[in-house]
Amino acid sequence: MTDATDAVGDAVRNALRQEPLDPDMFDPVCPSSAMPFRVGDKWTGMIVRCLEGGPRRFTELRAPLRAVTPKVLSETLRAMERDGLLTRRPYDENPPRVEYALTPLGRSLIPLLDAARAWSETHLPHLLAARRNHRRDAP
Amino acid sequence: MTDATDAVGDAVRNALRQEPLDPDMFDPVCPSSAMPFRVGDKWTGMIVRCLEGGPRRFTELRAPLRAVTPKVLSETLRAMERDGLLTRRPYDENPPRVEYALTPLGRSLIPLLDAARAWSETHLPHLLAARRNHRRDAP
DNA sequence: GGGCCCGGTTACTTCAACGGTATCGGCGCT
DNA sequence: AGCGCCGATACCGTTGAAGTAACCGGGCCC
């Protein structure tokens, strides 16, 4: 039996903050290996996608970015903060809580990511087919 | 990424066999250091721009891409050929002549490059300013 | 026969990104 | 007392892209 304050807290949380990120939101096969473009560092584009729906904390980001180690995630977040793509906001609580949120500048990358994804949906199969044929033609 | 596209462009170029590429068509300061995205390898985007107006030969490409060494240019071109982004066409002449031309797949990247350039024109100054401020705030 | 030109190739080195493992500090819980 | 949570940081190793320097083959011209 949950008590009323907890229910309110959950409601607020769900209003301000979304459902957990899908751990499978990124296809482990596709990313940097095949797509002929990249936004920022290896993880930048995926982080923007994760923050698209609202702020997230460090460990929330680790779920969908399963392969990323805390070191690399921390480095990438810092670089993005330095470039004004996101803000880092620590809360004085315990256990510690830090929230990362996109700035308008960070959000401005979203159309670019959309364009890249659209390109991939249309053309990436051609690219991969060309790659396969080439291997067959000139080994 | 600055370039030397002029609206007069394609018709004239295709009819007359184009003018030499402008050796200064790429800003040596801007490219990989600042822009938060890349198309393919370091040089791929610039090569697409160079071939946008029609086929070019190896040494023609070396003029605008001043920093590129023959090794890297050769590697990049072969990777792009493998991926179906361009075709390589050697002529049986002498001195040897080889022409590289974009395929439709390669051309399909142009809108993406345009979007990236548009982003840069609008937002890159903000990013650079944020980077400067950050250095000032937390040294 | 000794240059030159074009379109490369080969061998070696450098450098930054990325990754792995281990550890920390502060607090609360049992 | 000891453990675990969260958000990191330190140290070190690997990898792969990129750069440097030198050379090559084959015609052509002097």
Image (cartoon, coloured by chain):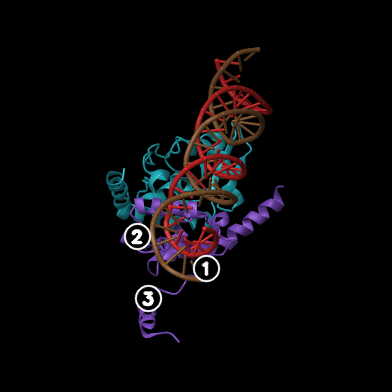
Chain colours: A purple, B cyan, C brown, D red
Residue at mark 2 shares a chain with residue at mark 1: yes
Q: Residue furthest bottom?
A: A1
At a point 57% along the width and 56% down the height, the residue shown is A34
How far is disc 2 from disc 3 in space, using C-alphas?
A: 17 Å
Whether residue B134 is situated above or below residue B105 in the rendered picture: above
Can residue A31 be seen here? The reply is: yes
- Dot 1, how many residues are within 10 Å of its Cα: few (below 14), some (14-19), or many (20+)? few
**Which amino acid is tagged 3?**
Arg
CA separation in Å, label 2 and label 1: 26 Å
Q: Nearer the viewer, residue D15 or D25?
A: D15
Q: Secondary structure at mark 1?
A: loop
**Where does residue A92 sit, x and y in percent of width and height?**
33, 62
Mark 2 lies on residue = A90
* Secondary structure at numbered mark 2: strand
Any part of residue A115 in sight: no
- In the displayed structure, does residue B26 sit left or right of residue A120? left
Is B4 placed left or right of B43 in the picture?
A: left
Q: Which residue is mark 3?
A: A13
Q: Amino acid at mark 1?
A: Met
The residue carrying mark 1 is: A25
Marks 3 and 1, how far apart in space? 22 Å
- Would residue A109 appear left or right of D12 to someone viewing this image? left
The one nearer the camera, B126 or B68, is: B126
Viewer-side label of 2, 1:
2
Quadrant in the picture for residue A15: bottom left
Name the N-terminal-most of marks 3 and 1: 3
Residue A113 sits in quarter: bottom left
